[in-house]
Image (tube, rainbow, N blue to C red):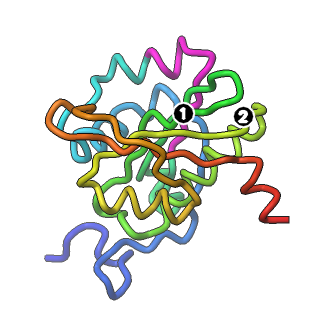
C-alpha cells in the first residue's frame, strides 16, 4: 500500500509543489500552523500567541505558504512586527516534509516585500547558532550577522541578523 502523497513526490522523496501561494494567516489556518510549530521548535508558541498576533496586533503581519496542489495545505508560515522603520521577523517555519522545496525562500521574500511596502528600511531577526539551515537561508537572502545575543534561547545563544532593505533594493536595480 502506498503512503498518501507518494504520487506527488519527485525523485528526491520531497513533495513537488507545482503551485505555491502566499497569503495572510487566517483563524482557520491555526491547526495546521500549530502542527508545523510543534514539529519545528523545541519551545513552540501556543495557539493563543498566534491568535494575539493575527487578531489583535495591528503592527504585525503573519503569512502562510500554501501548497495549492493539495487543497491549500499550509506548508509554512512566517511573521513580522513593524517597528517604525524596522521590521523584525518573529517566526518562520516550514513543515519538515517541505524543507528544500523553496517554501522558506518564498516566505522570506514575501515578508521583505511587505516590510518595504510599510516603509521599513531594515529587517532583523534572531536565529539559533546551531540552526545552520535557517542561517543559510537568511544569508542567501542578504542577511548578515550583526551581533550575538547570549542565552537568548535559554539553552543557546542567538545570532542577530539584519539586512538593509534600501541597499538591497538599489543593488537589484
The residue under label 1 is: 88
Q: Quadrant of the C terminus?
A: bottom right
Quadrant containing the N terminus is bottom left
The image shows residue 32 at horizontal and vertical percentages of 35, 40
Residue occupying the far top of the picture: 56
Is 130 placed above or below 15 here?
above
Residue 25: image tag: none
Helix, strand or loop at label 1? It is strand
At 56% across and 27% down in the image, what residue appears? 81
Residue at the outermost right position: 173
- Residue 23 found in image quarter: top right
Q: Residue at x 29, y 27 (%)?
A: 45
Residue pictured at 52% horizontal, 22% vertical:
54
Q: Which residue has dot 2 on it?
A: 120
Using the rendered view, name the quadrant where residue 57 is placed: top right
- As for residue 71 lying within the magenta part, the answer is no
**Is 55 within the magenta?**
yes
Q: How dense is the environment of label 2, judged by Cα within 10 Å: few (below 14), some, or many (20 and up)?
A: many
Q: CA distance from mark 1 to mark 2?
A: 10 Å
* Label 2: which secondary element: loop
Q: Considering depth in this image, is 104 or 32 the residue closer to the camera?
A: 104
Nearer-the-camera pick, 14 or 110: 110
Q: Residue at x 50, y 52 (%)?
A: 66
Q: Quadrant of residue 168?
A: bottom right
Coordinates of residue 87 in the picture (x, y in percent): 61, 33
N-terminal label among 1 and 2? 1
Residue 106 in the image: above or below residue 1? above
Q: Return the residue nearer the eye: 76 or 15.
A: 76
The residue segment tinted magenta is: 52-64
Residue 171 image offset from top left, x and y in percent: 78, 64
On screen, residue 103 versus residue 151, left or right, reads right
Amino acid at each position: 500500500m502506498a503512503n498518501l502523497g507518494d504520487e506527488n513526490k519527485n525523485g528526491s522523496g520531497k513533495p513537488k509543489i507545482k503551485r505555491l501561494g502566499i497569503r495572510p494567516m487566517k483563524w482557520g489556518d491555526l491547526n495546521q500552523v500549530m502542527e508545523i510549530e510543534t514539529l519545528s521548535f523545541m519551545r513552540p508558541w501556543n495557539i493563543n500567541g498566534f491568535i494575539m498576533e493575527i487578531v489583535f496586533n495591528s503592527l504585525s503581519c503573519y503569512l502562510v505558504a500554501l501548497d495549492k496542489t493539495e487543497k491549500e495545505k499550509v506548508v509554512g508560515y512566517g511573521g513580522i512586527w513593524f517597528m517604525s522603520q524596522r521590521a523584525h521577523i518573529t517566526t518562520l517555519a516550514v513543515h519538515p516534509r517541505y524543507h528544500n522545496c523553496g517554501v522558506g525562500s518564498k516566505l522570506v521574500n514575501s515578508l521583505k516585500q511587505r516590510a518595504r511596502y510599510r516603509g521599513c528600511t531594515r529587517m532583523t531577526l534572531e536565529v539559533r547558532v546551531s540552526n545552520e539551515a535557517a542561517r543559510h537561508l537568511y544569508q542567501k537572502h542578504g542577511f548578515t550577522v550583526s551581533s550575538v545575543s547570549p542565552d537568548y534561547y535559554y539553552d543557546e545563544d542567538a545570532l542577530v541578523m539584519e539586512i538593509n532593505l534600501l541597499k538591497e533594493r538599489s543593488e537589484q536595480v
